[in-house]
Image (cartoon, rainbow, N blue to C red):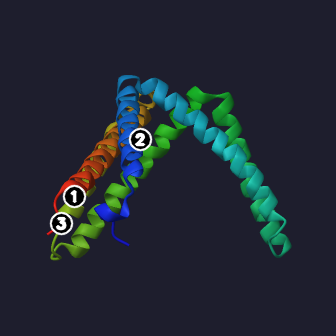
Amino acid sequence: MSVTAATIPRPASGWSILWAILMIVAGLFALALPWAATFGAVLVIGWLLVFSSVFQALHAFQAQGVGSILWKLLVALLYLGVGFYFITHPVLGMAALTLGIAIFFLVEGIADLVTYFKERKSPGSGWILFDGIVTLVLGLLIWRHWPSSALWAVGVLLGISMLLTGITRLMLTLAVRRLRAAPAV
């Protein structure tokens, strides 16, 4: 289903603008205080892991077979342990999360470069190369400055993401409002 001016009710566009502005403000705060944003992200992830462990354990008893139950219970214990660790040791959790993101970016960047060389004759493959290089450089920068990057990396990435998402949502909502206000052709 495509989004058109007719498919978005008027109050929704007002709420959409409000949420976009809040997202932009939150992104700016995260960029201004990256340590606090990283700290908060670690605590949120920790609590999400703790809650997920409960659901994983409950799901384990619905699984078929002893091996499946045991595996799901082990995963639930892992979620609980990592979540509890992040909550009780958020600064060390910041370091672990930042290292995980650096490794993720390195692997993703390498995978994008491999994909580019396999698909380099395809139209638009230059974007894959660009994405791979940027992602690899980001991973290397975070890795090179780790563990000190734990104080800023996640918060900066979170802030950039929220800021860009907020701007995108705001621009899309304003475009839909202009479409709605334009005379029908």
**For residue 91, what is the image quadrant?**
top right
Q: Which-is-in-front pick, marks 3 and 2?
A: 3
> Along the horizontal axis of the image, is 110 left or right of 12?
left
SS category of the residue bearing label 2:
helix
Give the number of marks: 3
Farthest-out residue, front: 183
Mark sitting on residue 167: none
Circle 2 Cα neighbour tier, 10 Å, few/some/many (<14 / 14–19 / ≥20): some
> Along the horizontal axis of the image, is 161 left or right of 62?
left
SS category of the residue bearing label 3:
loop
Q: Name the foreground residue: 119 vs 41.
A: 41
Residue where numbered disc 2 is placed: 19
Q: Position of residue 56 (x, y in %)?
A: 74, 57
Q: Name the foreground residue: 52 vs 139.
A: 52
Q: Is residue 84 visible?
A: yes
Residue where numbered disc 1 is placed: 179
Circle 3 Cα neighbour tier, 10 Å, few/some/many (<14 / 14–19 / ≥20): few
29 over 172 or under it: above or below: above
Could you tell which of marks 1 and 2 lies nearer the N-terminus?
2
The alpha-carbon separation of the residues under discs 3 and 2 comes to: 28 Å
**For residue 158, what is the image quadrant?**
top left
Could you tell which of marks 3 and 2 lies nearer the N-terminus?
2
The alpha-carbon separation of the residues under discs 1 and 2 comes to: 20 Å
Q: Residue at x 38, y 46 (%)?
A: 16
Quarter of the C terminus within the rendering: bottom left
Residue where numbered disc 3 is placed: 184
